[in-house]
Image (cartoon, rainbow, N blue to C red):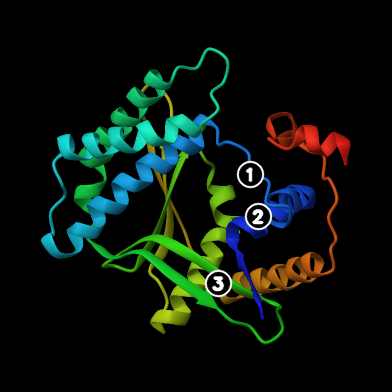
């Protein structure tokens, strides 16, 4: 039986094969940092709002969204690891500001078509089934993924991100047509609660390249090829102690 492989797992293997082994082969889970916890809480708010908006055509009031965020944050914060000097209450305030700005500036411009669209793609030459969820597809067939970061993202990073390539492949497979565009809506944790909307496209050549990456990564995983890849991420990696003992 084929195993499932997500874009998150592929990106994890490409970043560091040993991280992949610790997380998905050995099932060792490290607590999330504050940005990941914040992103999950914001994501739950956006999912709920857009899910109901498909039928109502209206966004929920900002006060309602803030309450939903607060409830989610209380749960996520319990599991999160905070940096020295970082306070959960301050991070919560950041999240509420982001939600308020997003509700004012972004969500009124979006009419959702599909929310949290699950997909599973099967391939003859790959031992894994590619699976995932697309955050949001609007009525214009713009595929949108939400990100929460501490720094602004660059166009070049979005243009080469394999997550959006996988989403384009999935959409064209289950819809039988090409999307209008792909976009990251990036919620930046700064004083102004900056929100970026960075659009990109994917060609068939981009998709073919992604399929090659998928094939080689799945083959390497199936062959048990796991090794450390030392890079800038090592200093903040939750598996660094295990890595030293490897």
Q: CA distance from mark 1 to mark 2?
A: 17 Å
- At numbered mark 1, what does the secondary structure look like: helix, strand or loop? loop
Q: Quadrant of the C terminus?
A: top right
Q: Residues within 10 Å of mark 3 (few under 14, many from 20)?
A: few
Label 2–label 3 contact, CB within 8 A? no
Badge 3 element: loop
Q: Quadrant of residue 78?
A: top left
Q: Toward which corner of the image does residue 4 lie, by quadrant?
A: bottom right
Give the distance between the C-alpha atoms of the residues marked 2 and 3, in whole angstroms.
Answer: 20 Å
Q: Are marks 1 and 3 in contact (CB under 8 Å)?
A: no
Q: How much space separates mark 1 and mark 3, taking CA atoms?
A: 36 Å
Which residue carries the number 1 mark? 29
User: Can you name the residue that lies furthest to the bottom here?
Assistant: 124
The spot of residue 119 in percent (x, y) is 47, 72
Q: Vertical placement of 83 versus 159: above or below?
A: above
At horizontal 73% and vertical 57% (from top left) the residue drawn is 25
Closer to the chain start, of discs 2 and 3, is 2
Q: Quadrant of the N terminus?
A: bottom right
Side of 107 where 167 appears, left or right: right
């Amino acid at each position: 039986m084929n195993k499932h492989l997500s874009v998150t797992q592929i990106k994890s293997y490409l970043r560091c094969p040993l991280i992949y082994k610790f997380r998905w082969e050995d099932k060792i889970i490290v607590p999330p940092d504050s940005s990941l916890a914040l992103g999950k809480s914001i994501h739950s708010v956006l999912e709920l709002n857009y899910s109901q908006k498909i039928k109502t055509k209206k966004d929920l009031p900002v006060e309602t969204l803030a309450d939903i965020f607060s409830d989610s944050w209380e749960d996520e914060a319990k599991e999160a690891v905070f940096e020295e000097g970082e306070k959960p209450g301050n991070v919560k305030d950041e999240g509420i500001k982001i939600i308020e700005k997003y509700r004012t500036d972004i969500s009124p411009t979006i009419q959702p078509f599909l929310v949290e669209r699950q997909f599973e793609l099967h391939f003859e030459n790959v031992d894994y089934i590619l699976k995932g969820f697309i955050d949001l597809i609007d009525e214009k067939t713009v595929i949108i993924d939400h990100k929460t970061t501490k720094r602004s993202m660059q166009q070049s990073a979005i243009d080469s991100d394999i997550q959006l390539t996988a989403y384009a492949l999935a959409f064209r497979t289950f819809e039988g047509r090409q999307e209008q565009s792909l976009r990251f809506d990036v919620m930046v944790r700064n004083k102004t609660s900056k929100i970026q909307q960075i659009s990109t496209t994917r060609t068939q050549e981009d998709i073919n390249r992604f399929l090659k990456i998928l094939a080689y990564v799945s083959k390497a995983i199936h062959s048990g090829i796991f090794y450390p890849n030392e890079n800038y991420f090592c200093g903040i990696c939750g598996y660094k102690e295990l890595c030293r003992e490897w």
